[in-house]
Image (cartoon, helix red, strand yellow):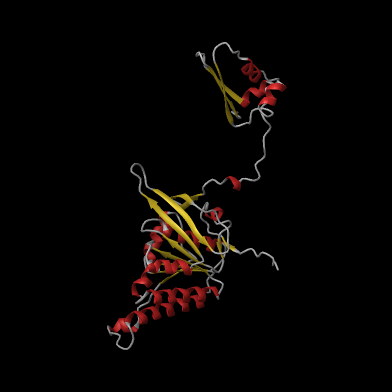
Amino acid sequence: MSVPIQITPRFATGVPGLDKVLHGGLPRCSLILVEGPPGSGKTTLALQFLIQAVRAGESCLLATSAESPQQLRSIAASHGWSLDGINITGLSEPSSAEDTGLDYTLFPEAEVEIGETFDHLFSEVERLKPKLLVLDTISSLRVVAPTPAFHRRQLKRIRDFMAARDCTTVMLDEASMTEKDLRSQTLSDGIIELRQKQSPYGADRRTLRVSKLRGCSYVSGSHDATIAAGGLTVHPRLVAQSFPNLVATPALGSGNAEIDALVGGGLPRGTNTLIAGPAGVGNQPYHHYTRWPRPSAARNARFFYSTRARRVISVAARDWA
């Protein structure tokens, strides 16, 4: 028995080109993992997510352990952005035990630190009720986790807590293919990979790739990306199936019905045609394509003629106006 297909609500990213790759944006109430080495643009991408949420009138929260608020404002200023409207908090707050210099004796120190971190984070979520949460970065949680299984449980706790409050969560992480990272990938609803490829010459090449988006369609493969003043821009790769509404233009006729029939009705516009032959075969096809009934038609093609032994005529059937 079939059921109606439900369209997943999307969260606009505000990143030029990325919403096209994601077919409308990030799925709401999902857990998105943004992976990439240092300098690949993870923080810049996350700030664009947050700024777009502010533009849409939605509450958002940035919990960071990587940069201070002053460093974040400096990054935003370099792009001409303002962080007004974005709630910023530390991913962990000093506890009373840390303030007094006491050591933990009853429980492992890592479990106490992570518990305090989560208590602070969840209290901020309950207070602000954000629709978008950015964690920068989860590697700080991984460092203090005693085991991979413990780290996975904490990530699942974040995912379930935020999803129950209709909050989209974006986690930033340094990319590496370790077992711990694979656990976070399994828990995530979507994975966006940022890469910076070194080139033997010229500038490095930045790419963005969506490797997972649970229950949603997207444009797979690597897409070029650039970072300049104004933020990160994604240049989606060309896909033939993504241009279904192109209007076919009429073919370029020669004025000779027999010649047009040989080429399927005329020369397709925007193409190049090569007419070749040895000396003495005649240039009648060339003359037919140069005799238009309207003077304005001359703007629709260019001809290149060679006087060599093998006469070659290249016809570029396109609009040069």
The number of numbered discs placed on residues in the rendered structure image is: 0
Specify whether residue 82 is in view. Answer: no
Identify which residue is drawn at 60% across, 47% down: 241
**Residue 26, percent across and down?**
54, 62
Which of the two residues, 284 or 108, is positioned nearer the viewer here?
Answer: 284
Where 241 sits versus 176, above or below?
Answer: above
Quarter of the image with the C terminus is top right
**Residue 302, percent across and down?**
58, 23
**Residue 160, percent across and down?**
51, 75
Where 308 sits versus 81, above or below?
Answer: above
Specify whether residue 222 is in view. Answer: yes
Which of the two residues, 287 or 70, is positioned nearer the viewer here?
Answer: 287
Which of the two residues, 66 or 212, is positioned nearer the viewer here?
Answer: 212
Q: Residue furthest right?
A: 257
Figure quadrant of residue 41: bottom left
Where 16 sits versus 52, above or below?
Answer: above
**Residue 45, percent across and down?**
45, 58
Q: Residue furthest top?
A: 280
Q: Is residue 300 left or right of residue 212?
A: right
Identify which residue is drawn at 58% across, 31% down: 271
Q: Residue furthest bottom?
A: 106
Q: Is residue 116 left or right of residue 28?
A: left
Figure quadrant of residue 137: bottom left
Quarter of the image with the N terminus is bottom right
